[in-house]
Image: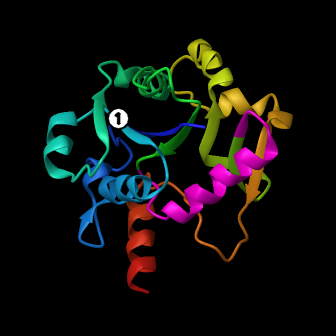
Amino acid sequence: MRSAGVVLAAGGSTRMGEPKQLLPVGGRPLLEMVVAEASASSLDEVVVVLGANAERIRGEVDWGRARVVVNPDHAVGMSTSLRAGIAALGPDVDRAVIMLGDQPALTATLLEELLRVHTDSGLPAAAFGFNGITHPPVVLARELWGELEALKGDVGFRAVLRNRPERVAVLPLPGDRDQPIDVDTPEDYRRLLGTETG
């Protein structure tokens, strides 16, 4: 089964007030941390979708083995970036792992666990779960990709999964384990830096 990672990082970071993709964490940009972990996993390829501030971000991040695509419609919302990332994948890809570019706790190990759960379940999707809610990254088998075409505006893959939970294999994360929460606000970033140094 050929697997590709799609890292969504096209947002304008309006709540942060500056490009959060480039916020320094551990001496490197936040987005670079996510790309590095995806590249260190067994994913056959990694695609990063940029949009707002694309040229600046492209020049300041080490992409490793990932390739970049730019979504010209990023201002319309996440649905367009999701479709742009999926469209960049070749016909030989069987499943896509959709990741957010602002999840600093994401690791290659977590991605491997999620891929294993998806494979073992035989279901078309897999996601992390804590507090009774599914969270990205999520695995979407090719059979689900067509459903992304109907998404509009700032809506992502959760809309595809929410109405049919029986299609989703859930990997529970215990409360004492780092969870790949996304960084959206200055408060989130301060909390992240406090955790990093604490």
Type of amino acid under label 1: Ala
Residue 72 falls in image quadrant: top left
Quarter of the picture containing the N terminus is top right
Q: Residue at x 67, y 77 (%)?
A: 176
View extreme (right): residue? 166
Percent x, y of residue 177: 64, 73
Taking the spot 20% from the left edge, 44% from the top edge, the residue there is 57
Q: Position of residue 144 (x, y in %)?
A: 67, 23
On whether residue 120 falls in the magenta region, the answer is yes
In this rendering, would 53 be left or right of 10? left
Is 57 left or right of 117, judged from the image as shown? left
Q: Secondary structure at mark 1?
A: loop
- Residue 143 screen position, x and y as percent: 68, 22
The image quadrant of residue 145 is top right
For the record, the magenta segment spans 102-125
Q: Residues within 10 Å of mark 1 (few under 14, many from 20)?
A: many
Q: Which residue is mark 1?
A: 10
Does residue 134 appear in this view? no
Q: What residue appears at the point 44 percent right and 20 percent down from the top-left corner?
A: 87
Q: Is residue 26 above or below residue 162?
A: below
The answer to which of 47 and 17 lies nearer the viewer is: 47
Q: Where does the image place residue 4, in percent across and percent down from the top left?
A: 49, 38
